[in-house]
Image (cartoon, grey):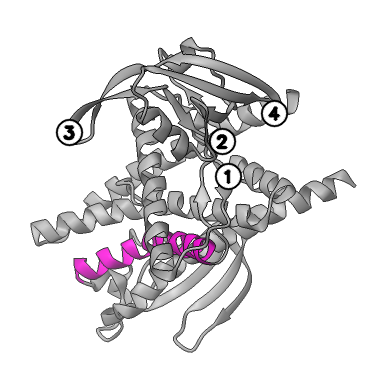
Amino acid sequence: MNWLINIAYYVLPFLVLLGVLVFVHEFGHYLIAKLCGVKVAEFSLGFGKQLFGVRDASGTLWKLSLIPLGGYCRFYGDDDASSTTSNKKTLTEEEQKYAFANQNPFKKLAIAIGGPGFNYLFAILIFFGIFAFVGKIEYPPIIGEVLDGSAAQAADIKSGDRVLSVNGNSVKTFQEFRLEIDMNTTGWADLEIDRAGKILHKNIKLKIVTDKDGNVSERPMVGVTSVNTVELSPTKMGITEAFKESCRETWRITATTLRGVYQMITGVRGTDELGGIVRIAEMSGDISKAKSVIDFLIFMALLSINLGLINLFPIPVLDGGHVLIFTIEILLRREISERTKEYIFKFGFALLVALMFFALYNDIVHLVKRLVS
């Protein structure tokens, strides 16, 4: 009976989450392609054998496939779902007008960006709905990471500590906590902390750090980051402010993700945080078990941003690889040879498979640690 419960909590939310995000991504490609005059041969949720399909009036086959771990849009005239090869020699002159391979690079570029663009638009719409009708997302004053060599590390501040007050001033959000530290003029901060229900007092000598944000300035720093979880305040926003805040929130998540990727590449951050489908299934299950629909929607928005961003990375086979190639063709004012593209996409496919296996390895290690702990 437990396995049925686990399916309900982990497998079903994961399939719903992935299905929605894949549909949004591929629909972005589909819609921009239609606007550019390109026919779409197939729109598939999943890979492999077709389970169900229906063809619309324009000739597009909408289908559900066996392996529910992605999806694709195959354009008219393409030999494969990745649009890396075409069969334009078999098309009539009239048919070639609607083939993806025969479009100018500007249209190809727009179609390639359409998928990631819709992922971003979807995330903005989710945040907009939450801000306008539920309340503002706020980050709680909970310590996420304690930086090495920081004032917090010297004062034995731990990840998971919740800051209740700074110098006697109550703080309800991480932003308020940071503001109290910034406004400090004594060089010391008296923190009241809740650590697993135990109230502690920490008198911290702040470190003065040079902050280069366009203007070089010195700021007192504790040396901690916030957790990734969010809380909702009852404060609802107007339509205009909700839209602006949803765009700001989407940008903040994008910037944070890019900073994390850069830290992994430079070796500052460990690559064990890189996860794949198992980690996503685990997280979606945990959220569906313990939290609300709003938390699930926020998680969906976060993953939609990450899906859009990752697909824009200049890796061949991904949308970003296509974007790079079409941009080069625009600059060169000529098409790159099919042979060169074939080599580029083979390299990209090998790199993508390697990353997937590495993420799967991290997922398995993470899952084993969780089961034995």
Main SS of the magenta part reads: helix
Q: Position of residue 195 (x, y in %)?
A: 65, 23
User: Looking at the rendering, in which quadrant would you find the C terminus?
Assistant: top right
- Comparing marks 1 and 4, which lies closer to the viewer? 4
- Asked if disc 4 and disc 3 are in contact, CB closer than 8 Å, the reply is no
- Asked if disc 2 and disc 1 are in contact, CB closer than 8 Å, the reply is yes
Q: CA distance from mark 4 to mark 2?
A: 15 Å
According to the picture, the residue beneath numbered tag 2 turns out to be 360
Q: CA distance from mark 2 to mark 3?
A: 42 Å
Q: Position of residue 256 (x, y in %)?
A: 39, 40
Q: Does the image show residue 274? A: yes
Q: Name the amino acid type tagged 4.
A: Arg
- Comparing marks 2 and 3, which lies closer to the viewer? 3
Q: Which mark is residue 215?
A: 3
- Comparing marks 3 and 1, which lies closer to the viewer? 3
Q: Which mark is residue 15?
A: none
Which region of the structure is painted magenta? Answer: 104-132
According to the picture, the residue beneath numbered tag 1 turns out to be 277
According to the picture, the residue beneath numbered tag 4 turns out to be 370
Q: Name the amino acid type tagged 3.
A: Asn
Q: Position of residue 359 (x, y in %)?
A: 52, 35
- For marks 2 and 1 on the same chain, the one whose residue lies earlier in the sequence: 1
Q: Name the amino acid type tagged 1.
A: Ile
Asked where in the image residue 269 lies, by quadrant, the reply is top left
